[in-house]
Amino acid sequence: MLSLKDASLLKTQAFIDGEWQSALSGQTMPVLDPATGQQIAEVPDMRVQETQQAIAAAEKAFPLWKAKTAKERALILRRWFELIVEAKDDLAQLMTAEQGKPLSEASGEVLYGASFVEWYAEEGKRVYGDLIPAQAADKRIMVSKEPIGVVAAVTPWNFPNAMITRKCAPALAAGCTMVLKPAEDTPLSALALMVLAERAGIPKGVINVVTTAQPAVIGRVLTDSPVVRKLSFTGSTGVGKQLMRQCADTVKKMSLELGGNAPLIIFDDANIDKAVQGAVISKFRNAGQTCVCTNRILVQSSVYDEFVEKFNKAVNELTVGHGLQGAFDQGPMINQAAIGKVSELLEDAVQKGARLVCGGQEHTLGGTFYQPTIIADVTNEMRVAREEIFGPIAPVFRFETEAEAIAMANDTEYGLAAYFYANDLSRVWRVSEGLEYGMVAVNEGVLSTEVAPFGGVKESGIGREGSRYGIDEYLEMKYTLLGGI
Ligand code: NAD
């Protein structure tokens, strides 16, 4: 079903020290189309030794890459950006095949992913230091920033391209080298990016990709290595906490982009039609499998019925199907376990009194397709209020006052993204300031962009990706004192 213009982008070997390699054991693991369960390809199932080779390659490449000027690195990254954009259609096809998202969403992600490479190619040139007025006349104080060294990156399956470029673009621009372990469900997008990195002239060893069906084994090698000075992880909060513990022994710097429980609040002064549009995109994009996906829709009592009615109409218009077979709004979920989780959450809510407005079942297409679903009259005792749904179920809660809405929104250990719809200017300020979240979108359902800092507070993570702040995650500050002047 794949019809790539450039067939060489479908790689079935991992990428270590500039070489395409099989696992030393010869073992492979299958890559499946989540829509059909059919095998698309096999990639190496690597273990400890290959990971150590990758770390050694990154260590060897580091001094040479660091010694390049920021402009030299920028020219290479810029070329990589251009090659990614040129290959957009093929990269999108590979992504839809292994991840399931509709082709239009996959192309959008490729361009979004590329935008980080473009942004950081430039931002690397602006790693400025400081001269600080010294405390004594015969001294001078200088602050400079240096690349941290070898970085390990571990990425999830829900954004198989952008979660990689969001890490490696700032790392490489800063002068770091990297070992990347992509998610086992979606290695093909990562490997295709490496084909283009090689073509762009990124020197060997600067970026290495190890594929495996045993992420914990590779994770342990990466976290135990004293050579690896930083781990950047995007994924679930549980695994993030585990990796944090593992990084303690070598005191690694960490960036963690973890789970969320995003509220989308609709106040009585909101434009309800716009709120419906925002709720649809924020909830059902990527079949609800996005860390910044709306997890809870909170609606003020006086507009509750109007919202639910209009939302129901909009959700009923969503089309579901295989992303390579037509222009659908929603693809399959990633695997059967994901279907099991959403079914369980729905059953729990309905049993505890939630009202099913639409959907609520596996889709007639079979496989891992699930119907876009709305449940109303949802309360805090239901599991959907606390857990990341990560699927196409939209629970709608009711509130009376602004203070109650803010309290409900903040009643979670997560703090990644929050959305709200309101028009009263003072309310917009009050609510924005009251939300304990790393990112807040007002009257918008999508907020990710390379120019703004992406990241969460509380148990949603540490650090930021994108924007001018994102490169600091890969830099160490050095204070130099010059005396006897
Ligand atoms: P996951 O934590 O299961 O896996 C993420 C990555 O970690 C994968 O590459 C996996 O192979 C690897 N991994 C799993 N166990 C490991 C271990 N013991 N050691 C080392 N690596 C290990 O998460 P997932 O199911 O792939 O992704 C979904 C989660 O990611 C959701 O919770 C979602 O909210 C989160 N996410 C967060 C962001 C963000 O920016 N905050 C973005 C996308 C996804």
Image: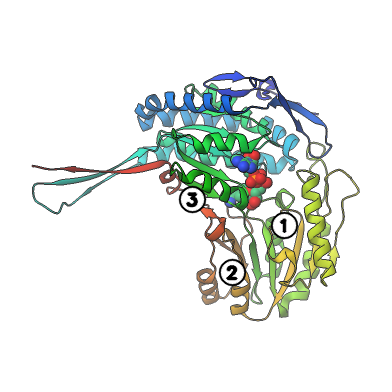
Give the CA distance from mark 3 to mark 1: 23 Å
**Residue 182 appearing in the image:** no
Going from N to C along the chain, the mark reached first, 2 or 1, is: 1
* Amino acid type of the residue that numbered disc 1 sits on in the rendered structure: Ile
Q: Is residue 306 shown above or below 97?
A: below
Q: Are marks 2 and 1 in contact (CB under 8 Å)?
A: no
243 or 463, nearer to the observer: 243
* Distance from mark 2 CB to nearest ligand 1 atom below 8 Å: no
Under circle 1, the secondary element is loop
| Secondary element type, mark 3 | loop
Quarter of image, res 20: top right
Asked if residue 22 is positioned above or below residue 263 in the image, the reply reads above
Q: Secondary structure at mark 2?
A: helix
**Horizontal and vertical percent position of residue 105:** 69, 44
321 vs 49, left or right, is right
**Disc 3: which residue:** 464
The disc placed on residue 416 is none
User: Splitting the image into 4 quarters, where does residue 3 fall?
Assistant: top right
- The residue singled out by tag 1 in the image is 389
> Sequence-wise, which precedes: disc 3 or disc 1?
1
Q: CA distance from mark 2 to mark 1?
A: 17 Å
